[in-house]
Image (cartoon, rainbow, N blue to C red):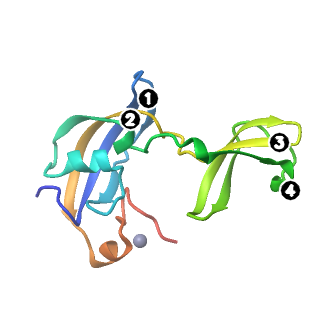
Amino acid sequence: MNIENNKVALIEYTLTDSAGEQIDASNGTPLAYVHGHGNLIPGLEKQLEGKTVSDKFTAKIAAADAYGERVDALVQTVGKDMFQGVEELEVGMRFEAQSEQGMHSVEVTAVEGDQVTVDGNHPLAGLDLTFEVEVTGVRESTAEELEHGHAHGTGGHQHD
Ligand code: ZN
């Protein structure tokens, strides 16, 4: 069976940046996803199309087809009073912020006096990525998986 729209595929992967530094890896626990539903970054999903079990390949993906380019407008300086209830603000802290596009994660990148700079870019935005991928399974999706738009079971979404 080959990977195509609405099939569930399981992949082992190692993700590195352009300097060869490892960012993430499945480490023996394959990731399950539903092909064609935007579960993966577009550049990786495109290269998985048509692959089958045991296929191994290297996918070099430019930032635009990965987590997107960095957007300067997503870096904002706000008052400390936006963080009520936070004892001590430190660079590197992440918060969920409400915006017009819904909830998204921001990272504190600077704290100066009463001013806090937050960056709403995805941590991997602007990076060219390399994935070493091995396909470890391809199967039909269930009706429920299609309805939810993600895989269930091993390596997939775990519902409570
Ligand atoms: Zn679900």
**Label 4 amino acid?**
Gly
Write down the residue under mark 4: 85
* Quarter of the render that holds ligand 1: bottom left
In what quadrant of the picture does the N terminus appear? bottom left
Q: Residues within 10 Å of mark 4 (few under 14, many from 20)?
A: few
Q: Are marks 3 and 4 in contact (CB under 8 Å)?
A: no
Q: Which mark is residue 22?
A: 1
Q: Name the side, left or right, on which 138 lies relative to 88.
A: left
Write down the residue under mark 2: 15
Does ligand 1 reach within 8 Å of label 2's beta carbon? no
Q: Which mark is residue 115?
A: 3
Q: Name the side, left or right, on which 54 lies relative to 36.
A: left
**Label 3 amino acid?**
Gln
Residue 49 x, y percent position in the rendering: 18, 52
Q: Relative to the observer, which residue lies in front, 31 or 34?
A: 34
Residue 128 vs 44, above or below: the answer is above
**Disc 4 versus disc 1: nearer the observer:** 4
Whether residue 123 can be seen here: yes
Residue 85 x, y percent position in the rendering: 86, 56
Real-space Cα separation, disc 3 to disc 2, in angstroms: 35 Å
* SS for callout 2: strand
Q: Residues within 10 Å of mark 1 (few under 14, many from 20)?
A: few
**Label 1 amino acid?**
Gln
Q: Which mark is residue 64?
A: none
**Disc 3 versus disc 4: nearer the observer:** 3
Real-space Cα separation, disc 3 to disc 4, in angstroms: 16 Å
**Disc 1 versus disc 3: nearer the observer:** 3
Real-space Cα separation, disc 1 to disc 3, in angstroms: 33 Å
